[in-house]
Image (tube, helix red, strand yellow):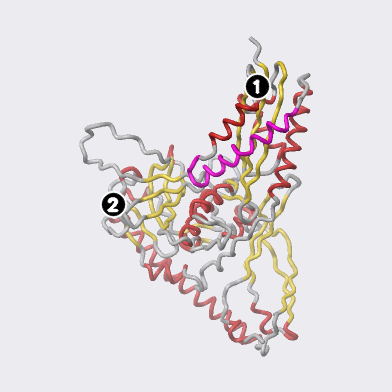
Amino acid sequence: MVDATTMLSICDPVHMVLIKTDTFGETTLVASYFLEWRSVLGAENRVTNVAVELLGVGTESKVSVGVLNIKLEMYPQLNKTLSQEIVNTQLALERQKTAEKERLFLVYAKQWWREYLQIRPSHNTRLVKIFAQDENGINRPVCSYVRPLRAGRLLDTPRQAARFVNVLGYERAPVIGGGVGKQEQWCTLLAFLCRNKGDCEDHANLLCSLLLGYGLEAFVCVGTKAKGVPHTWVMTCGTDGTITFWESLTGHRYIHNPINPDDPPLVEQPKPMYPYRTVGCVFNHQKFLGNCQPSDAVEVCIFDLHDESKWKPMSGEAIKSVCSPGATTSLPPFPPLCSSTIDAAVISNEIELQLRILVSEHRKDLGLTTVWDDQLSYLLSPALAAYELERTTSISAGNEEFQDAIRRAVPDGHTFKGFPIHFVYRNARRAFSTCLRSPFCEEIICCRGDQVRLAVRVRVFTYPESACAVWIMFACKYRSVL
C-alpha cells in the first residue's frame, strides 16, 4: 500500500510532450503539458478522468491544438483516500508559496541587475540572460534549464556525451514575419529529446547537464559569435585552472588562453581558434555570474569565477529557492536517457540499398551504365569507423590499414577517388541531394571512363534516444586513359 499523505507531498508534475512525425521522419513539437496528477489522491474508487486542453508551442503558445482525455489510477493502491478538500488546500498552498518565491526572486534579480549596470553603463548592451522562455512561453530562470544528468551506461565519457549532443539535430526556433531578431525559445529537456532537434541553447543546456553529471565544473556561456550573432556554448573549469570551451553543435573543444590587452605586441598574437567573440554571463544549476570585466571580448576575458571584481555572482540561496530539485517553481526532474531503438546494421543496409538505386537512376538519366564493386564498398568500412572515432575522441586511428587495402584493390594504371560525408538524419534521398551539390561527390557519382566501378558504404552509429551519426562514402575506380 502507498501512503497517500506522502504522495501528496510530491509536487513534481507529469510532463507530457506531443510530437508529430511526417512521412520523411521529420519531427515537429506540437504541445508540451505539465499535468497536475494529485487529483487522483482524492478521487472516489481511486480513479479519476481529466480533460486537459493542449496549447501550441512558441509563437502558438496561446492557440489550442486539441483536448486530451486522461484516465488516472494509482498503482499500487493507496492506504486511504484523501478528501478532495485536503488535496485542493495543499495545491492552493503550493501555488501561493510558488508565487511568493517567484516574486522574491524577481525582486532580487531586478536589484542585482541595477547593481550590475552601476558598475559600468555599457553593461546594458551585454548578453546577460537571467530568464528565458520555454516552449510554452513561460519565463523561467536560466539556471532551471540545467541539472546534473547521469547517462547511466549509455555514454561512457564526457567526449562521447559531447558527440551525442552534437548529433542531435540543429533547428532554430521558427520566426513569423520579417525584420525581427532571433526567436526566443529554450526547450525543456524532454521536449528537446522527443523532437530530436533544437536550437544552440537546447544543445548547450543538455551538454552542460551531462558534463556536470560526469563530475566536471561546467557552465553554459551566453554571448556572441562572429558578426554579433547571439550564441551559447559550454565551458569547463579544470582544477589546474584550465578553461575549456565545448561547442555543443559540433563537438569541438577549445582551450582558452586569454590575451593581456596591456602587453606590448612584441609579436603578432595568434587569432583564437574558437568562434566566440563576446561573453555576457555564465551559469549552471547553482551559480549565475555576470561578466563585469572592462571588455566582454572572450579573447581577453579571465575566467576566474571566484574574483568578484571580474564576475558578479548572484546569491546561491536565491537561485536555490527557485531552481533546486523539489522547488515548486523548478522544472520536474530530468528524464533518464533512453537507449537507442535503432538497429544500426539494418538501417545502414537500407540506406545503402536506397543510395545504390538513386545513383543507378541518376547515371541512367545521364546515359551511363552502373557497375557496383561489392568488395571495394566493403573496404570503405574501416574509414567510416575511423572518422566517427576521431569525431568522438579526437584520435585518428586505422588510416594505414585502410590505405594499404585500397592500394591492393586498385590495379596499376587505375585511379581511385573517395568522398566521405556525414549526416545526422536517415533520409537517403535528402542525403543524396546534398551529396550531389558537392563537385567532388558529383564527379565520383557521374564518373565516365574505362572500366568504371562504383562503391558506396553507409555506416550508422547509434546514440541514446533516437540520435545517430550517419556516415556515407562514395568511391570509384577507373582505368586512366591519357
The quadrant in which residue 271 appears is: top left
Answer with left or right where residue 364 lies relative to residue 111: right
Marks 1/2: CA–CA distance: 70 Å
At label 2, the amino acid type is Arg
Residue 335 drawn at (x, y percent): 59, 64
- Which residue matches tag 2? 120
Per the image, label 1 sits on a secondary structure element best described as loop
| Earlier residue among tags 1 and 2 | 2
Residue 37 drawn at (x, y percent): 65, 75
- Which residue matches tag 1? 411
Q: Residue at x 61, y 52 (%)?
A: 463
Name the foreground residue: 405 vs 479.
405
Residue 275 drawn at (x, y percent): 43, 40
**Magenta segment: does it hold 378?**
yes
Name the foreground residue: 204 vs 106.
204
Query: What is the span of residues highlighted in magenta in the rendered image?
Result: 372-396
